[in-house]
Image (tube, rainbow, N blue to C red):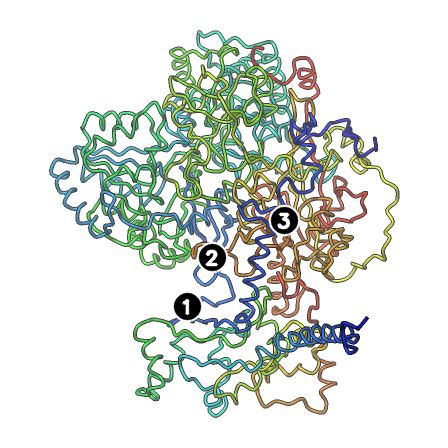
Amino acid sequence: MAQIFPRWTTRLPLLAAVVVVAVIVGGVGFFWYYGSPEYRNVGYRPSQPVAYSHKLHAGDLGIDCRYCHTSVEYSASAIVPPTQTCMNCHELILTESEKLLPVRESWATGMPIEWVRVNKVADYAFFNHSAHINKGIGCKSCHGNVAQMEKVMQVEPLSMGWCLECHRNPDPHLRPLDKITDMKWQPGPDHAEFVERVKNEWKVDPPVDCSGCHR
Amino acid sequence: MSKHDDKKQATGKEYWRSLDQLAQTERYKEFLHREFPEGASQNNNAWSRRNFLGIMGASLALAGLTGCRRPEEKIVPYVKPPEEVIPGIPQQYATAMPFGLDAFGLVVESHVGRPTKIEGNPHHPSTLGGSNVFMQAELLTMYDPDRSKLVLNSGRESSWDNFVAWWRERAELHQADSGRGLAVLSGPFASPTLYRLKKEFLRANPDAQWVSWEPISEEPMIEGMRLLTGEPLMPIYSLDKTEVIAAFDCDFVYTEPGSIVNSRRFMDGRRIKEQHDPMNRLYVAEAAFTPTGAVADHRLALQAGRIPALLMGLAEALANLGEDIDIFGNQRPPQLTAHERAWCLELAKDMLIRNGRAVVMVGRKQPAHAHAIAMAINATLGQIGQSVSLKRIKEASLPDTEALASLINDMKGGRVKTLLTIGLNPAYSVPGSLDFAGGLERVEHTVHMGLYADETAARSTWHLPQAHFLESWGDVRAADGTLTFMQPLIAPLYGGHSDVELYSLMATGRDLAGYDIVRETWQGRFQRGLFESKWQQVLHDGMVRDSATEDENTGLRFSRLVQHLARHPIQAPEAAIDELVLTPSMATFDGRYANNGWLQECPDPVTKLAWDNAACLAPPMAQRLGVKNEDMVSVTMHGKTVDMPVWIVPGQADHTVVTALGYGRTAAGKVGNGVGVDTYPLRSHHDAYVRQGVKISRSSGTYLLANTQDHGSMEGRPLVREMQVQDYRKHPETIQHMEEHPPLKSLWKEHDYKSGYQWGMSIDLNACIGCNACTLACQAENNIPLVGKKQTRKGREMHWIRVDRYFTGEVGQPEMVHQPVPCQHCENAPCEQVCPVAATVHDSEGLNLMVYNRCIGTRYCSNNCPYKVRRFNFFNYTSDYAETIKMAQNPDVTVRSRGVMEKCTYCLQRINEARQIAKKDGNRQIRDGEIQTACQQACPTNAIVFGNINDPDSEVSRTRARNRTYYMLAYLNVQPRTSYMAKLRNPMESMLQVEKKYGKQGGKA
């Protein structure tokens, strides 16, 4: 009796198995990488209603972060400044600028400017700015060097794994409290000594329990 | 039969939760058998689970293509930031909630201009920091999307300005005729501003009528005092100053006015810290089984109509024991049974043993003369100025039912041309004996102001949306006269105007802002030059401190009472005649909260019914009628018939039908329409609460009631431990020995919880009154969703802290105990051991955590929880919230979605907030008492204590060290962090003999 199937078909089951494994591994790998907050969110740089440049204000002009983000030291929220904060200066400076038209409009009409959120943790995670600022974690650790950003961009994944990395070992991120907003500050050679001292003094003991962030 | 199946306990008492359980009916067995009741795992819509999954699969595949893109989220800052508002830091404002002739001082939490939580003001004499269910639920009423939003003229949209123009024209016409044909119907109030405006209105319109009335008010007690003193006075009790309390049909811990402070003061007299601490004694005589009856040391169930006779019996007994109490005149005391006479005698003896440190209280369901007799007894015992003080009701418009009847008469006679109804819904709530709706038809111009476009609004020419008290300026006097201030937490959400603004328009024709009107009242009252600082001070405090009215010392003239009793002799009704008892509902009160889902879903402390009222019957009465739970009956009173379902309540007086008012609304809103049965038609304006001669008969069919009674049953293990205080003093260790178990050894290596904060809670069952304030406070604080009647019937209610109710003793004469049950935060938590995804885990401070984003909804944890405190989101209850309801959510707590398990967190958000404050405040320790859980803060009797059990000096550690402490189901070795303190009763030996001889049912058999 002639063979119905040619010889190469004996390899089919093996081939099928290899393909299935490859698809599964590939699929998982695909989502593992492309579905991760690191891939999806880092680099998110939306356009804002006002072309506000952090590089100009915080970098070149050297305005401290807390001039606008006023409540960062004592509230969970750092706040996006009200229109009034812009107008403190821009009532006198660049009063005719076209770029500032939406700001003047908001000021005149009382309608708020709708900024687009860049950095966001999940709704079920409760982040508190003041808790970090008062324990020597600088703005830069999470937000990157904002003073060099024309348009603000997300630089860290803000995923749970990323949070926990620092909660388990905050040492590399600790800095003097008066350097919190300093984008240029770098740990010195005596950093280990400094960490040893302040961890004790400030009682730096970040929670790693679920209850630290999830309520 | 194992030991734990045996319902007999070490005390010899038999605990049961419902009649079904005692009878072991099929339904009950099935309930116990299945962890989740029938249908709980099936979506009951026309969609089957299979085709649902099929369609979901397809849509998921489609959604996958677009779902990767991050949704754009906006941040909307202020344009000009208001002073002192910092996003992320809530603010607290003092304000007040007017309630009848009382006012509850409040502290309201606000997040960026949104009120999110109401608490009692600890300095205010009407709350002392505690709260009740209504206070907690008012928040939801304020955000209710069904509230009226438009000024209506003949049912068409109009505007406030149009109304003002119309009114000015109208007022001119009436004023020309000195106000003839003009009438105002308002709720009773005690408020300097409203009173000033009412006077101004009547000055401008001297012939106008102003009637104040409310379906459920303080009128009977005020009239009682008028009967005795000639003056309308308000009795205010200080129950901590007395040793014996006799409550006659007076549910003073729950439904009666002043319940928050009365229950606190009452419990202050029975907080046994050391074995030999004194304990007061409570006698209760009542028809319905109430929470007050549940905490009584001796309870006599008898028809409410016999209460005045029983009071006369007590007076007579006191007179026989030599007290100079002359209220009888020539009248022979009414005929009491031998049982009742013996009961009165023992009570009278007990009162005199305590040198008269005893007080008699009468509830508002009783007529004025009962209040007068009780106060005469109090005066004889020398208690006026001691445990009860009489206060003149200042700057008030008092409730007056007679005036209402005459107003309706005038309306029918066409003598009223213009009627303004303010803050009331009389078309629904006026008793059936008065035809308000018929009268309203004859009035040419009718104006209605209310929170809702309700039944009265539909029959009125004009309807004006009213601003909620959280949206209004105002002032009000508390029951003891304390001047209390209301300030708005938010601008009127739905564009309403406050009653102050309407009164002002009516009185002066000027359309002013509430703020200016209230300040005008106070301009002349605060010292000149100091006005602004004084104003800031009272707004900060929420009241003028120490401004309670001084006690009234007018001699009580019994002669007036004697004359009254000679004309209206007290008769003890024949027991064979059935009586109808109408009670305020603690879900809707008089119907005003009908659209409040939190209240509707909150199970009644006694019947455990939610979402309905029922005709409550004693078991023997139900037997005679041949009805069982959920059978329909016809209740007929004076020609008016209402069909309603039956609920059998053990311990209720025989020959009595007890049912709640405030249901069966037709224009309440989406939540409240058609919930329960309207019983106002059965009501009369005379004897408004208790009427003899009701006819009740079986009608056809049954009606499904949502009852949480058998839910989470614990099968008779000694969960509530109870002792008589006399035995406890001799053998306090008995409490620990009520449950015997071998030494507890864990299979696991146990965690070490010896360092840092370790949170724990202690609940004193001796102080719990079962009032549900904790349940609602928790609901408000923790964003707990509503599930509706259908789901409640399936046992899917979501309350994180429930209040279990158990009956003890014989079916005919049971006692009742309440036990609040939140998550016990077991150190060896059984739920954690079965979760396949570690969604429920422990933290280092001993909290049993629920991590929502990990939960996949297997419900294994709930199966394995011995306390049945875990709640599962069977549906996405929160997805269709109206925008305003979203505003009511606590921003510090996650709003949960479908398929997620949830449970008590010990208010983790409050712990973390306190921790962050302490850390910022120089890295100090969290102070004891700095964290209050929502249930603890709301509890009117301070039954709940929370804190760090690792600190031996903390309140909770000291409480747990007391010998009444026990742990529920300790033999399971789950090591709960929530402990309980055993309940104590303080019966009198000789009264126990009376009960042994005659039982606990009064009246003629």
Q: Amino acid at mark 1?
A: Glu
Determine if residue A77 is in view.
yes
Viewport quadrant of the N terminus of chain B? top right
The residue lying toward the viewer, choosing from B346 and B905, is: B905
Question: What's the CA distance linking mark 1 and mark 3?
Answer: 41 Å
Query: Which residue is drawn at the image coordinates 65% and 24% (left, top)?
Result: B814
Q: Amino acid at mark 2?
A: Lys
Query: Which residue is drawn at the image coordinates 74% and 58% (left, top)?
Result: B836
Q: Which mark is residue B886?
A: 2
Question: What's the CA distance linking mark 2 and mark 3?
Answer: 21 Å
The crowd level at tag 1 (other Cα within 10 Å; few <14, some 14-19, many 20+) is few
Determine if residue B240 is in view.
no
User: Which one is in front in this view, the residue at disc 1 or the one at disc 3?
Assistant: 3
The crowd level at tag 3 (other Cα within 10 Å; few <14, some 14-19, many 20+) is some
The crowd level at tag 2 (other Cα within 10 Å; few <14, some 14-19, many 20+) is some
Q: Amino acid at mark 3?
A: Arg
Residue B259 horizontal/vertical position (percent): 52, 36
Location of mark 1 (residue): B83
SS for callout 3: strand
- Please tell me in which quadrant of the rendered image residue A199 appears: bottom right
Q: Earlier in the sequence, mark 1 or mark 3?
A: 1
Location of mark 3 (residue): B871
Question: What's the CA distance linking mark 2 and mark 1?
Answer: 25 Å
Q: Are marks 2 and 1 on the same chain?
A: yes
Q: Report the chain holding disc 1.
A: B
The residue lying toward the viewer, choosing from A169 and A29, is: A29
Q: Is residue B66 left or right of residue B354?
A: left
